[in-house]
Image (tube, grey):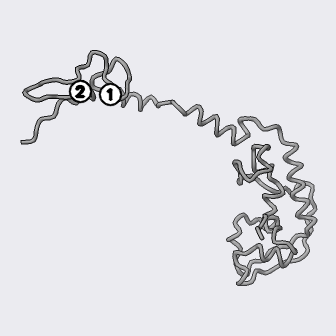
Amino acid sequence: MALLIDTISKNKSVFNPSSDLNSSRYGIWDLTKASVSFNGVDPQISSFAIVPDYFAMRPDLVATLKMGDQNRMGGLLKFNGISNPFAVAPGQILAIPTNQTIDEIFRAKKIDEQKAPASNTNTNPLQAFKKNQEQKKFQVSPGRKKFLDDKVKNKPDLILPPNVAQPNDKPVLKKEGFIVFAPNSGGGGFNVPIQ
């Protein structure tokens, strides 16, 4: 049986900025956003639990035992202000909210999201990332451009791939008794033989 954590399954629209992907398992999921809200919620605690040694780092077992459903693990953690399920330590005291309270904090978050302004490229992480990448696609910083210009010694007429000769370039040159291939490419001159 798969674990379906309620903080994600109940609020896909909170995390996935692309609403058409909410029914799928794919998309960009912004897990930094809050998944619950206590606005207008009167939280009710049904009991408290001291985490035994064998439940360390296993909030799913605490949720199963105390709330009757392992899938309520996310709500239990959020209610107790815990973001990392592996941080549940032996001897830690957890407040066990009622199932109604868990449902209410998720419902309150959905209401908060509906009140928020419509997403645009400034607030939608997917669109903002895409726009940022498109702007950076073919830009070269001025410092990098200057460095590259200074490296090219023969200042070519046309910017061509390294395996294509410039117009009026000589493909072969005889110099000091040596044959030099592509003497104009790279601006390095010809190599002196090792003696």
Q: Is residue 38 left or right of residue 8?
A: right
Q: Quadrant of residue 68?
A: bottom right
Residue type of the residue flagged with mark 1: Asp
Q: Is residue 71 left or right of residue 167?
A: right
Indicate the quadrant containing the N terminus: top left, top right, bottom left or bottom right. bottom right
Dot label at residue 67:
none
Q: Quadrant of residue 166?
A: top left
Residue type of the residue flagged with mark 2: Ala
Residue 79: x percent and y percent? Answer: 82, 65
Q: Is the residue 179 above or below the residue 64 in the image?
A: above
Say which element carries label 1: helix
Count neighbours of disc 1 (C-alpha within 10 A) and say few if under 14, some if 14 to 19, many if 20 or more.
few
In this orientation, which residue lies closer to the viewer: 151 or 21? 21
Q: Earlier in the sequence, mark 2 or mark 1?
A: 1
Residue 184: x percent and y percent? Answer: 24, 24
Q: Residue furthest top?
A: 168
Query: Image point 74% across, 66% down: which residue?
Result: 82
In this orientation, which residue lies closer to the viewer: 145 or 47? 145
Q: Are marks 2 and 1 in contact (CB under 8 Å)?
A: no
Indicate the quadrant containing the C terminus: top left, top right, bottom left or bottom right. top left
Query: Image point 79% across, 56% down: which residue?
Result: 35
In this orientation, which residue lies closer to the viewer: 173 or 102? 173
Q: Which residue is mark 1?
A: 150
Q: Is residue 10 left or right of residue 155?
A: right
Say which element carries label 2: loop
Q: Is the residue 190 above or below the residue 34 in the image?
A: above
C-alpha distance separating marks 2 and 1: 21 Å
